[in-house]
Amino acid sequence: MTAEYKVHGDVAVITLNNPPVNGLGLATRRALVAGLTQAQADAAVKAIVITGAGKAFSGGADITEFGTDKALAEPSLHTAIAAVEQCAKPVIAAIHSVCMGGGLELALGCHYRVAAPGCSVALPEVKLGLLPGAGGTQRLPRVIGVEAALNMIVSGEPVKSEFIAGVPGQKLFDRLAASPESLAEEALAFARSVAEDHAKGGPLPLVRNLPCKHPQGDAYFQFARNMVKGMAKNFPAPAKCVDAVEAATKGKFADGLAAERDLFIQLMWSSESRALRHLFFAERAASKIPDVPADTPLRAINAVAVIGAGTMGGGIAMNFLNAGIPVKMLEMKPEALERGVATIRKNYEAQVAKKKLKQDKYEQRMALLSTTLDYADLKDADLVIEAVFEDIGVKEAVFKQLDAVCKPGAILASNTSTLDVNKIASFTARPQDVVGLHFFSPANVMKLLEVVRGDKTAKDVMATVMVVAKKIKKTAVVSGVCDGFIGNRMIEQYGRQGGFLLDEGCTPAQVDRAIEKFGFAMGPFRMGDLAGNDIGWAIRKRRYVEKPDMKYSKTADLLCERGRFGQKTGAGWYDYLPGKRDAIPNAEVEQMIAEHRQALGITPRKISDEEIVQRLVFSLVNEAAHILEEGIANKASDIDVVYIFGYGFPVHRGGPLNYANEVGLFNVAAAMQRFAQNPLDDANFWQPAPLLARLVAEGKQF
Ligand code: NAI
């Protein structure tokens, strides 16, 4: 049953019942319309209340139906709302908890609305690159005014029911119930009173019949357009929301509704909305591990220890303090501890100064932090995260000590970015309790967490750390053990392409500009300067020994030999003024690149932005295909999540593999084969990965 029908005296109550949030999928819409028909046919019923079971009135359309026949199958949401409007008996929405998207549109179709306090009301479609397509852009302005409605529609943010109810002149809610508990009773009483009035004659009130005007419409909508243009560079939806609401203020309701429909369909087929919908599902799917059942018993995590109070350790500790979980930090020397604690303090104080954190919250968080120099103090920790120097010998010493002091069942995690988690696990007698938790810098800010599953990591450890990740507001993706895990293994190929592009004729600024225009937050060279070019240098030095056949541009090494490590030294691929992050191109660097090119006997050529973008992005795609085939990533969408949340890949492109699907894998593979012909590039690398070749042959997508 997706909606229940019950008669209470002379009032029929239709209760949407489609957990978790009463999404308005086809079955629910059918049950709703059937309930309305039944109530109309029953002479004893004088009014109808629509409400929702459980934790929501309704969270809106069922987005799993988007792009399928079910979304359009009758009764569509439009038809269901029309059935409500046309009902000859008064229909009252009894709204509580969550009333969003299609749920709010349904409520706006009702003749009356009674809301419980504390209910979140929103039209969040814009967050999926869409606009409310079932009359929301036409009806909401009629009940709360054009500006308030446009704010809600363009932002997608929820507003509390009691706030709306308190706005003078609002017509969204006819009544605010005293409490969520009394909503059902109050809605029934309200229904009876309007039924009595209705019996005396006169039409039922419809939102569509209310006027919709803005006193300075043209100027206001122009202003709104300018605002959204600045905010939503790569997304068409906010501007179309403005168009739709403007349509509500011009002409007839039916015309406005038709305009909304057209705009909605345009957005539904846009690559930006497809990307956002893909990411919506991808993020939720990332927390599911195929062979770890959802009901796996969890280990309790009430106390955390962090080893190493450096760049990463401090940020990692803050995540747990923010979530109210006590943290003990361990270091080798008291000075290092003091420095680490001071950095945490400084970070919080900056948040307090910016009014992003209240003073008392800051103090509460600091009170959860303790420090020690003694491993014996870690005996009660449920989870230990190691963030010491990236050196296998140091890791060995740390994990041996942890093994000796930690209680049985404690989870022992390493934040290593390059080392073998299986090897680290082997330093203990409990490899099943060891896992990689690869945070990204700054660890208190970046949302991505790569959870590195060792060969022996226990399933309940995996299940537990995925839940812990959610608690500390991270988006966790599982990676198998390999050099660089998912994210850094791919970025190495991207960085290599960046180097070849310099050798062949580009400047760092040209490469950065092209990929930033594509939508990346930062091009490879600005990113190198931010992260520190010495990190890549160290990795390459290792590669020259481990993989002597692998081809690299030497330009980045030449840069590092000059001590140009990036922002931290005030000079890298670009120059930086003290305390500033603006990248200023440097003539000497460009000279250095030109001389190196000359030494290699290369005649520079003009390289198009299109080639730059394709080589950078498709290098990610090819490596991702290897990663997927090797089982390092469980699914293609996990790789997209890594790149969106950890590497600044443009959100409107939905991640590298979603983008490859959009371009068409045939085209992607063809471009790779073209790049393989370039004698200055790496022909071996550009052989399409077997998985990619197979997908192309089968006409499939990632
Ligand atoms: P860091 O050099 O800033 O901090 C390391 C801290 O560990 C120092 O304060 C040091 O005193 C302490 N330490 C060293 N040996 C110790 C021991 N035996 N016992 C206790 N404390 C010890 O290094 P950072 O950047 O924080 O890196 C730490 C780990 O995080 C490394 O494994 C690194 O690969 C990884 N990582 C670093 C990222 C970054 O962007 N910096 C990103 C992701 C991972």
Image (cartoon, helix red, strand yellow):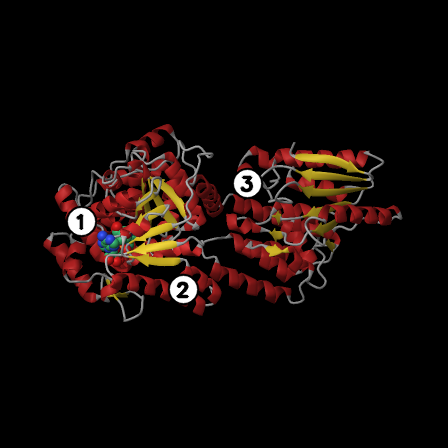
The disc label shown at residue 63, or none: 3
Alpha-carbon neighbours of circle 2 within 10 Å: few (<14), some, or many (≥20)? many
Q: Amino acid at mark 3?
A: Ile
Q: Quadrant of residue 10?
A: top right
Circle 1 is placed at which residue position? 540
The quadrant where ligand 1 appears is bottom left
Lower sequence index among marks 3 and 1: 3
Q: CA distance from mark 3 to mark 1?
A: 45 Å
Residue 528 visible in the displayed image = no
Q: At 77% across and 45% down in the image, what residue appears?
A: 188
Alpha-carbon neighbours of circle 1 within 10 Å: few (<14), some, or many (≥20)? some
Q: Is residue 580 left or right of residue 79?
A: left
Q: Amino acid at mark 2?
A: Tyr
Q: At 72% across and 50% down in the image, what residue appears?
A: 113
Residue 648 position (above or below residue 672): below
Q: Residue 61: where, in percent of width, then height?
A: 59, 42
Q: Nearer the viewer, mark 2 or mark 3?
A: 2
Q: Residue 349: where, in percent of width, then height?
A: 40, 67
Lower sequence index among marks 2 and 1: 2
